[in-house]
Image (spheres, rainbow, N blue to C red):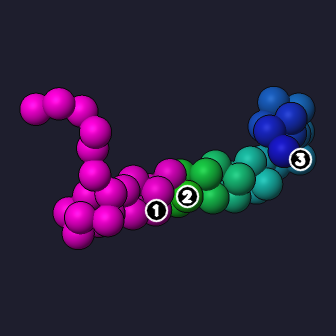
Amino acid sequence: MHVFLFKDRSGGQRTVRALTLRIGLSVLLFVLLILGFQSGLLQSRLPM
């Protein structure tokens, strides 16, 4: 999937869409992690 990020010479619309998707998924994962920790569904096992 990431090969055309370097070899795509056709305007870059596919590249923009792929980067937008990756950024959106990263933000979604981060938000879900924050919500999981705040709600207590996820807990850290690190000693405090």
Secondary element under disc 2, as helix, strand or loop, is helix
- Tell me which residue sits at (28%, 52%) in the image: 43
The residue stretch that appears in magenta: 26-48
The image position of residue 46, as x and y in percent, is: 24, 33
Secondary element under disc 1, as helix, strand or loop, is helix
Q: Mark 1 and mark 2: span between their CA atoms? A: 5 Å
Mark 1 or mark 3, which is nearer the start of the sequence?
Answer: 3
Q: Mark 3 and mark 1: span between their CA atoms? A: 29 Å
Find disc 2 in the rendering and name its residue.
Answer: 25
Q: Amino acid at mark 1?
A: Leu
Q: Evaluate if marks 1 and 2 touch, with contact meaning CB atoms under 8 Å apart.
A: yes
**Image position of 11 (left or right of 48):** right
Front residue of 22/6: it is 22
Find disc 1 in the rendering and name its residue.
Answer: 28
Front residue of 39/20: it is 39
Secondary element under disc 3, as helix, strand or loop, is loop
The image position of residue 22, as x and y in percent, is: 61, 51
Q: Is residue 7 visible?
A: yes
- The crowding category of the residue bearing disc 2, from other C-alpha atoms within 10 Å (few below 14, some 14 to 19, many at least 20), is few
Secondary structure, magenta segment, majority class: helix
- The crowding category of the residue bearing disc 3, from other C-alpha atoms within 10 Å (few below 14, some 14 to 19, many at least 20), is few
